[in-house]
Image (cartoon, rainbow, N blue to C red):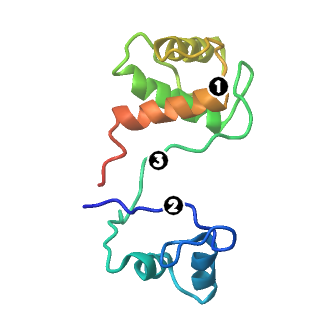
Amino acid sequence: MQPLFSQYCDGKTVSCPGWLSQWGSASLGEQGKDYLSILKNYYGNIYIDQAPIVSGVPVSFPGHTLQVGSTGNDVRTIQNQLNSISTHYPSIPKLRADGIYGQQTAGSVKAFQRIFNMPQTGVVDFATWYRISHIYVAVNKLAALV
């Protein structure tokens, strides 16, 4: 297996004849070519492995911080992920996954932040959300093909 090599070639200001380019691939897409046909146009006969089903992938950041007083599915997602992580990092207290961000959730978030060298705010901001997601994926081995 070899990774594909690419470099920035927009096709207008920087030209790399025969190489994958932003506008060259856009043009092929406008002609109805799918992504695999476009890649084969530039790189020849290639094989791309695709998972038939991707499951267990964490949810994207909701666009707002979670803190004491927050409620809903986003809070429940973080609570469930922290509970899963705490199996491997027992100094993170287990939580009742009720979707209510109370002091116990804030405490578990602070413990997570302490373990993973983050500012210990007890608030789930963008950085904390994705660090929790990253560790959750790692401890549950979700990145492997199923």
Along the horizontal axis of the image, is 53 left or right of 72?
Answer: left
Residue lying farthest to the bottom in this orientation: 31
Q: CA distance from mark 3 to mark 1?
A: 18 Å
Classify residue 101 by image quadrant: top right
Discs 3, 2 touching: Cβ within 8 Å: no
Residue marked by disc 1: 124
Residue marked by disc 2: 7
Q: Secondary structure at mark 1?
A: loop
Mark 3 or 2, nearer chain start: 2
In-front residue for pair 117/106: 117
Residue 35 visible in image: yes
Discs 3, 1 touching: Cβ within 8 Å: no
- Of marks 1 and 2, the one in the foreground: 2
Where residue 112 appears, x then y in whole percent?
50, 17
In the rendered image, the quadrant that contains the C terminus is bottom left
Could you tell me the amino acid type at mark 1? Val
Residue at screen point 56% across, 44% down: 59
Residue at screen point 59% across, 81% down: 29
Q: Residues within 10 Å of mark 3 (few under 14, many from 20)?
A: few
Q: Which mark is residue 68?
A: none
Q: CA distance from mark 3 to mark 2?
A: 29 Å
Could you tell me the amino acid type at mark 2? Gln
Residue marked by disc 3: 57
Could you tell me the amino acid type at mark 3? Val
